[in-house]
Image: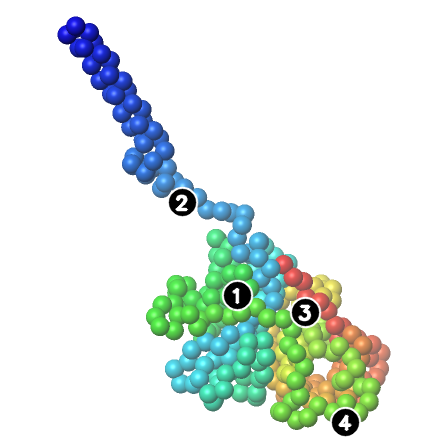
């Protein structure tokens, strides 16, 4: 009888030990009791996604607005335009900025510029990871992290800006500028003119004659707020680029930025500029350069003083 009780007790003990062993194996396989494989975790952390980068996965080309902090004013109104230039690792940028002189802070996408505005343009390049661009520029922050619909300004060494104002160092992607009356004057439409009937705002390109080279490659951007950006470069050699496919070399090319005004008839604009023809006749999808007094250019090369409206390539 005692032997039978001992036998039953031994079987019960073995059964209990088996259950405990099974639970331990399950905990090691599925639960959080066991330690993670640190070697595999480290290997996963150093894997770089070479496909899904900002450069190739985000529609980054376009116009960005932002108001960044300033030590002496209410802020710096910044507009940065990024364009493709047909290469794998480079692009073309146009930067416009102005220190705000009062406490009024304009809304993003509704910037207006005065004659105090400054600007630069040039090339930019991507880093190896494809998420940061570096502007070829002086006296301005070089680096921007490219996100979905935004740019984050980095410090002069390409590091993240920290501190209480860090959240203000970003630019937001915006659509084209709306049409505003200049200097607050009432907008009065008195007839069908180029000014009020044509979709004239945008970018125009052309190659005009030059005495010492194959021509002058010109890009003129007109904004609804009455501001312009002019870039030009003298062509070297026999190669003449196609309209809409301009590329800019590392040679310094002129950049002018300022305001323009319309004549009373609403068909000719005058750029506030020196050492450059200021008058352009505005037609449907085109600008015709006039002489220094605002008259039509005549002669054998007259047909070449035309700029054509273009859609700049997007990513």
Q: Position of residue 115 (x, y in %)?
A: 57, 88
User: Is 277 in front, or is 313?
Assistant: 313
Q: Is residue 315 above or below residue 43?
A: below
- Relative to residue 9, is residue 248 drawn left or right? right
- Secondary structure at badge 2 equals loop
Q: Position of residue 206 (x, y in %)?
A: 73, 72
CA–CA distance between discs 4 and 3? 36 Å
* Residue 285 quadrant: bottom right
Q: Which mark is residue 46?
A: 2
Q: Which mark is residue 264?
A: 4
Judge depth for marks 4 and 3 and give the one in front: 4
At x 69%, y 73%, the residue is: 203
Q: Which of the two discs, 3 and 2, labels the residue nearer the N terminus?
A: 2
Q: How many marks?
A: 4
Q: Which mark is residue 235?
A: 3
Q: Position of residue 94 (x, y in %)?
A: 58, 72
The quarter of the rendered structure image containing the N terminus is: top left
- The residue that mark 1 highlights is 150
């Amino acid at each position: 009888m005692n032997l039978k009780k001992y036998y039953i007790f031994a079987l019960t003990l073995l059964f209990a030990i088996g259950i405990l062993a099974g639970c331990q194996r399950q905990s090691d396989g599925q639960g959080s009791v066991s330690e993670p494989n640190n070697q595999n975790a480290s290997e996963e952390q150093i894997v770089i996604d070479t496909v899904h980068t900002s450069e190739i996965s985000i529609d980054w080309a376009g116009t960005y607005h932002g108001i960044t902090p300033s030590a002496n004013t209410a802020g710096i109104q910044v507009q940065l335009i990024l364009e493709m230039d047909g290469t794998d690792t480079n692009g073309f940028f146009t930067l416009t900025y102005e220190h705000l002189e009062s406490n009024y802070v304009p809304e993003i996408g509704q910037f207006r510029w005065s004659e105090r505005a400054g600007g630069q343009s040039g090339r930019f390049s991507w880093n190896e990871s494809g998420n940061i661009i570096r502007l070829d520029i002086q006296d301005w922050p070089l680096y921007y992290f490219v996100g979905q619909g935004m740019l984050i300004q980095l410090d002069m060494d390409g590091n993240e800006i920290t501190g209480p104002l860090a959240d203000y160092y970003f630019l937001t992607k915006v659509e084209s500028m709306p049409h505003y009356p200049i200097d607050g004057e009432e907008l009065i439409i008195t007839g069908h003119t180029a000014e009020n009937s044509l979709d004239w705002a945008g970018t125009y390109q052309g190659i005009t004659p030059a005495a010492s080279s194959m021509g002058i490659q010109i890009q003129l951007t007109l904004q609804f707020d009455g501001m312009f950006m002019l870039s030009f470069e003298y062509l070297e050699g026999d190669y003449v680029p196609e309209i809409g496919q301009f590329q800019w070399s590392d040679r310094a090319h002129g950049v002018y930025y300022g305001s323009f005004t319309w004549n009373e008839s609403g068909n000719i604009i005058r750029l506030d500029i020196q050492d450059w023809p200021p008058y352009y006749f505005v037609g449907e999808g085109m600008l015709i350069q006039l002489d220094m007094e605002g008259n039509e250019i005549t002669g054998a090369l007259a047909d070449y003083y035309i700029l054509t409206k273009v859609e700049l390539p997007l990513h």
